[in-house]
Image (spheres, rainbow, N blue to C red):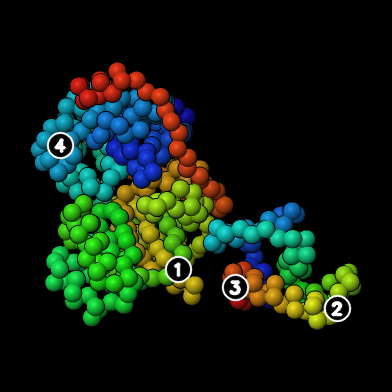
Amino acid sequence: MEKEQLNIAVTGLNNTDNPGPGIPVIRGLRESDKIDPRIIGLAYENLEPGIYMKGLVDKTYQIPYPKIGSDIFLERIKYINDKEKLDVIIPNLDAELYTFIKAEKELSGLGIHTFLPTLEQFEERSKSNLYEFGQKYGIKVPFSKSVTSFLDIKNLVHEFDFPVLVKGKFYDAYLAYNLEQVIGYYNKLSSKWGLPVIVQEFIRGTEVNVVALGDGEGETIAAVPMRKQYITDKGKAWGGITIQDENLLKITRDLIRKTKWRGAMELEIIKTSGGQYYLIEINPRIPAWVYLAVAAGQNIPEALVLLALGRKLKPFNSYEVGKMFIRYSYDMIGDISQFEQLSMNGEL
Amino acid sequence: MKLKSNIAISENGFMFDPYTGDSYNLNNTGVEIIKHLKAGKTNEEILAELKQKYDVDDLSLEQNLYDFIAMLSHYDLLENA
């Protein structure tokens, strides 16, 4: 079968010790037997390693951070689209998703397809709403509260036992053993990610994750569970293994069916020694470890692109258990002229 | 006591639990006991088999076998654990 030629823009090329999902997404697309992609990298910073990695990105454009304003952001996307005739954009970073979801119709008018959750789905699963989300859809979620002031923190002692998890709006989480530590982490997280900061009941157990893809009509197109084997000091998986856990798959399918989830998601779940499953977070996007799912037999980036183009897909019905990934760091050699080109012209 | 059905064990004693992703290294005696458990043998049958094969007193054998089985149970590797 002849592969379909598509121009696909991908963000999240920051393949550092806090890796973005861009590079694993691109690897999945490059290995597709249905798509022949021309990959347009969209980078926020000049030194995102994905820009310089050979054989992955065909052309890179610098884009402004969405916080600068959606008009400026979209102007840049239009400029890139005029040059590259984009078929699909895959945004991979939490902080940019809101802008892309809001701009879905405008992008569609330009002929650019996305496959993202609806704004309602995006907001109801946010960290600050997750507890209510769990109650609505019948999933156990640790008790949590949004904190926006010091007064809120003082009241926590009546509602929580220590330790508690203190989480940033988009990223980062710390375990706090007393009120003073909560205040310290509150200051750190609110200055970095803004408000609210989320305080969550700490559940002891093993963290397991699922990468999944919903078709927007309640069907789970893909789902692969993984356990982290090696975790960095930032809590990121540096090694992991696919596992066979029917309960995790059932939780995932139920959730996608009930929410009619559209797009990719990562479920972060704590499995207790008593066999209980607590949902601690939903990331409404592809996670950085997605290439493990590709290797295990479910090419989620490829499926997401096809769904974005309106194709009907049959769900993947299996994956290989015991597939492992191990990350490594690698020194690439670049040249100042590459850096100069990107810095001065905004493209490489 | 029966080992969970999907637990994989290779000849060299490497055991993989697909439910959790954990893996274990067993010595030869461990492999032997696991094989007996997989075959559905009772603890008494396993004790009898090992006693026949090894020069060991009853008390030590029993203690070691039950310790080993308790460890399998602790790691949630047994069907009715």
Amino acid beneath label 4? Phe
* Secondary element at image label 1: loop
Q: Which chain carries label 3?
A: B
Mark drawn on residue A205: 1
* Secondary element at image label 2: loop
Task: Give the quadrant of the N terminus of chain B.
Answer: bottom right
Mark drawn on residue B74: 3
- Does residue A258 lie above or below A276 as drawn? above
User: What residue is pinned by disc 4?
Assistant: A73
Query: In the rendering, at what x and y percent does residue A234 appear?
Result: 37, 52
Q: Mark 4 lies on which chain?
A: A
Query: In the rendering, at what x and y percent does residue A190 appear?
Result: 19, 57
Amino acid beneath label 1? Gly
Are labels 3 and 2 assigned to the same chain?
A: yes
The image quarter in which residue B29 lies: bottom right
Mark 3 or mark 2, earlier in chain: 2
Q: Residue at x 27, y 41 (%)?
A: A91
- Does residue A328 lie above or below A227 as drawn? above
Mark 2 and mark 4 in contact? Answer it, CB < 8 Å. no
* Secondary element at image label 3: helix
Q: Mark 1 lies on which chain?
A: A
How many numbered circles does the render carry? 4
Rounded to the nearest whole Å, what is the CA distance between mark 1 and mark 3?
14 Å
Query: In the rendering, at what x and y percent does residue A305 appear?
Result: 34, 39
Mark 2 burial class by Cα count in 10 Å: few <14, some 14-19, many 20+: few
Task: Give the quadrant of the C terminus of chain B.
Answer: bottom right
- Describe residue A285's horizontal placement relative to residue B37 as left or right: left
Rounded to the nearest whole Å, what is the CA distance between mark 4 and mark 1?
41 Å
Q: Is residue A255 visible?
A: yes
- Describe residue A240's horizontal placement relative to residue B74 as left or right: left
Amino acid beneath label 2? Asp
Q: Is residue A109 visible?
A: no
